[in-house]
Amino acid sequence: MLFNIEEISDEGLDFKLHIDKSKFEIDEEDCSLNKDVSVSGRLSRLDDDFYLNGNVNTELNLKCSRCLDPLVHPVDGKLKTHFMPPIHDSNINGEVELHLSDIDTETYKEKRIDLTQSIRDRILLTIPVTCLCLDNCRGICPNCGVKLNVSSCGCDSDSSIDPRLEVLKNLKNKL
């Protein structure tokens, strides 16, 4: 995933990579890579700036947000990153304000561009806020812990109302 900038001509460089999943360090209990990562794209050059445009494909093992069952999430994300030389400004100290254009900008070091962080970021940004095993996943009963997709429980649904929201239930009954 390292490219020497001297190998990238003014016409650009097309590439296809198949990278071992262990290189990305995405291996948590609730989020891990299911298979190796395929990356294809083009690095183009404009003076000392380099632009990455490409695609990343893999699969993630996630857990359902409602019932905690495992699920496989396909990743098919676009890569777009601007690599620039390091800034050697002695006036910069402490905090630096970032702008919207800085989000997809990285610096390269020692005349080498490393795609690892860009690819890892794109994979993690494809994870939905709410991961569901089924569109109509019923989750887990908050009283007895039964997975409601598999079986029903005998718990009273009204007894599961949060006491802090009891006032709203009374208000609803008045209306």
Image (spheres, rainbow, N blue to C red):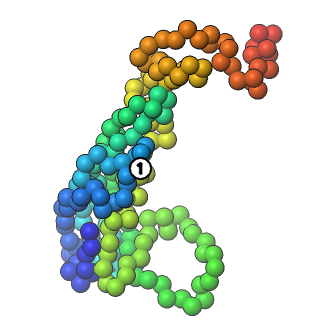
Quadrant for residue 120, please give it. Answer: bottom left
Pick the quarter of the image with the C terminus. Answer: top right
- Residue furthest to the front: 144
* SS at mark 1 in the image: loop
Q: Is residue 59 above or below residue 96?
A: above
Pick the quarter of the image with the N terminus. Answer: bottom left
Q: Residue at x 37, y 34 (%)?
A: 70
Q: Residue at x 75, y 23 (%)?
A: 163
Q: Residue at x 32, y 67 (%)?
A: 115
Q: Which residue is mark 1?
A: 28
Q: Is residue 88 above or below residue 143?
A: below
Q: Nearer the viewer, residue 156 or 9?
A: 156
Q: Is residue 70 above or below residue 105?
A: above
What kind of residue is marked 1? Answer: Glu
Mark 1, Cα crowd under 10 Å, few <14 / some 14-19 / many 20+, is few
Question: Could you tell me if residue 168 is visible in this image?
Answer: no
**Residue 79 % position (x, y):** 34, 59
150 relative to 97 in the view: left or right:
left
